[in-house]
Image: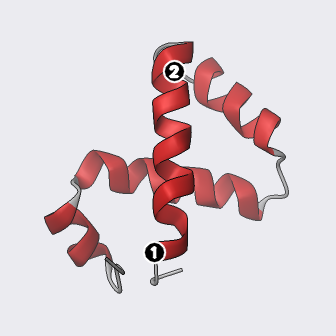
Amino acid sequence: MRFKTRDDFIKEIGIRKLGLVDYIYSLEQLGKSEREIQGILLEREVSKSPRSLDMDWKFYKKVKPNVGWK
């Protein structure tokens, strides 16, 4: 499913994941590499453990092509 607006994303996926997607996208726009972003997510406790980081990262990579509001 393609998400044209943030509202569509929230209805389908949820608000926490919206924040995660927006946050990672903003770090990408700052020119951060994948490793730097993953380090930031762990350091700032956005992802609480390496396992949750892996799940969050895979989720982001999965939905990124379907996000249309960027």
Amino acid, disc 2: Glu
Amino acid, disc 1: Asn
Q: Which residue reaches farthest top?
A: 49
Residue 46 lies, in percent from the top left, at 48, 29
Residue 42 lies, in percent from the top left, at 60, 21
Q: Nearer the viewer, mark 1 or mark 2?
A: 1
Q: Secondary structure at mark 1?
A: helix
Mark 2 or mark 1, which is nearer the start of the sequence? Answer: 2
**What residue sits 73% from the left and 57% below the top?**
28
Q: Give the vertical position of 36 relative to 21 (above or below).
A: above
Residue 52 lies, in percent from the top left, at 45, 22
**What residue sits 14% from the left and 67% below the top?**
11
Q: CA distance from mark 1 to mark 2?
A: 26 Å
Q: Give the vertical position of 42 relative to 3 (above or below).
A: above
Count of marks, rendered view: 2
Residue at image mark 1: 66
**What residue sits 56% from the left and 15% below the top?**
50
Instruction: Depth check: give the residue in front, 12 or 6.
Output: 12
Can residue 69 be seen?
yes
Residue at image mark 2: 45
**What residue sits 22% from the left and 75% below the top?**
7
Image quarter of the N terminus: bottom left
Can residue 46 be seen?
no
Q: Secondary structure at mark 2?
A: loop
Q: Give the vertical position of 35 relative to 51 (above or below).
A: below
Residue 59 lies, in percent from the top left, at 46, 47
Image quarter of the C terminus: bottom right
Callout 1 environment at 10 Å: few (<14), some (14 to 19), or many (20+)?
few
